[in-house]
Image (spheres, helix red, strand yellow):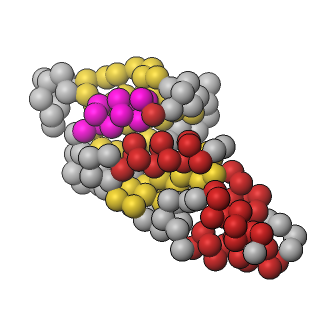
Amino acid sequence: MQKIIPNLWFNFNAEEAVNFYVSLFDNSKILSVSRYGEHGPAPAGTVLTMKFTLDGQEFLAINGGPEFRFTEAVSFLVNCTSQEEVDRLWSKLLEAGGEEQACGWLKDRFGLSWQIIPTVLGELMSDPDPQKAGRVTMAMLQMKKIDIAGLHAAYDG
């Protein structure tokens, strides 16, 4: 059992969001669903909460209403092993109204912030040669979606 579970508050579109997220990652599934009863703030039968996993990590989604919204203060960093994985997740998360942001960040159509980051970025940025690491950092700062070939070109000078 996972001790700490992120809880995501949605404006009555949790079911759509969870189904979308589960479709993006291997080893992901819906674990349980609870629904509003006769006396809830939403029509009876509407999803109240959904417990789910994304690549084995547990989450909880709640249909809480419009009182709270996501901000960039919390984001999910996805470590990607290839440009193909970066490209696939980037395009899928931007579908139907997502918004590109700088340095590998984006907001999906539900307003949730994601960092789609190739693992090589951290490796190159932590090179002991400060010039190489600095060139990689400067290249990354110019990107929206992270381009691995561009990082390597900056690293090589």
Side of 124 relative to 34 (left or right): right
For this orientation, the residue located farthest to the right is 128
Q: Is residue 76 above or below residue 7?
A: below
| Magenta region includes residue 81 | no
Q: Residue at x 42, y 29 (%)?
A: 23
Q: Is residue 12 above or below residue 53?
A: below
Image coordinates for residue 87, horizontal then vertical, percent: 50, 47
Visible in this render: residue 78?
Answer: no
Image coordinates for residue 78, horizontal then vertical, percent: 57, 47
User: In front: 66, or 129?
Assistant: 129
Q: Residue at x 77, y 69 (%)?
A: 156
Dividing the picture into quadrants, the one containing residue 4 is top right
Image coordinates for residue 100, horizontal then vertical, percent: 39, 61
Q: Residue at x 79, y 65 (%)?
A: 126
Side of 47 relative to 141 (left or right): left
Side of 94 relative to 42 (left or right): right
Visible in this render: residue 123?
Answer: yes
Residues in magenta, as a range:
13-23
Picture quarter with the N terminus: top right
